[in-house]
């Protein structure tokens, strides 16, 4: 079975001692992605839509580095600091995914790693 780390350059998660993700067999397990630029700068402070767009751009970048893409995502876990943004998540599912929809869990959390972050998403995807 193949087990290897996904590497990025630049890697915005490196300062936090976090790998972008791992390939285990035919699956990719991505670390939670949030609104950090590839250089590690926070994007969209106070702007949920901008943070969501950057989060999905980061997901795409890590998936590509692992040999996959968004169409191969089988499971997402979405962390929100305000469940009031749930309708935007439903809309985003239709924007960022196509049927068959990935399995999904969504939870509201008190806070994320940085106080300005509003959303974080981790995914499991098939390779290929």
Image: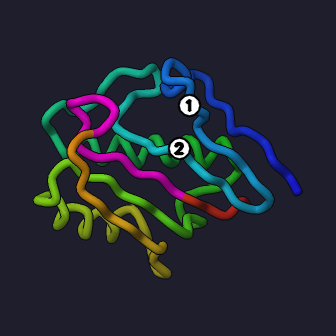
Residue at the image position 45 percent from the left and 77 percent from the top: 101
Numbered badge on residue 28: none
Numbered badge on residue 31: 2
Percent across and percent down for residue 121 are 40, 51
Residue at the image position 16 percent from the left and 59 percent from the top: 83
Q: Is residue 38 above or below residue 26?
A: above
- Farthest residue to the right: give it: 1
- Farthest residue to the front: give it: 110
Which of 116 and 50 lies nearest the eye of the viewer? Answer: 116
Instruction: Give the side of residue 113 with respect to residue 21, left or right.
Output: left
The residue singled out by tag 1 in the image is 18
Measure the C-alpha gap from mark 2 to mark 1.
Answer: 8 Å
Percent across and percent down for residue 97 are 43, 68
Percent across and percent down for residue 44 are 22, 33
Residue at the image position 76 percent from the left and 54 percent from the top: 24
* Screen quadrant of the C terminus: bottom right
Q: Picture quarter containing residue 28? A: bottom right
- Farthest residue to the bottom: give it: 100
- Asked if the magenta segment contains residue 114, the reply would be yes
Q: Mark 2: few, some, or many residues within 10 Å (few <14, many ≥20)?
A: some
> Are dots 2 and 1 in contact, CB under 8 Å?
yes
- Asked if the magenta segment contains residue 39, the reply would be no
Labels 2 and 1: the sequence-earlier one: 1
Q: Is residue 19 above or below residue 15?
A: below
Residue segment shown in magenta: 112-123
């Amino acid at each position: 079975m193949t087990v290897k780390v996904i590497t990025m350059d630049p890697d915005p998660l490196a300062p936090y001692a976090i790998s972008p993700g791992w390939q285990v067999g035919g699956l990719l397990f991505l670390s939670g992605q949030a609104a950090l630029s590839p250089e590690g700068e926070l994007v969209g402070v106070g702007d949920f839509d901008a943070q969501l767009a950057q989060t999905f751009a980061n997901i795409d970048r890590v998936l590509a580095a692992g040999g996959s893409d968004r169409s191969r995502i089988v499971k997402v876990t979405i962390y929100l600091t305000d469940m009031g943004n749930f309708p935007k998540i439903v809309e985003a599912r239709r924007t960022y995914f196509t049927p068959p929809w990935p399995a999904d869990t969504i939870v509201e959390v008190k806070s994320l790693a940085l106080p300005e972050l509003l959303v974080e998403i981790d995914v499991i995807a098939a390779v290929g």
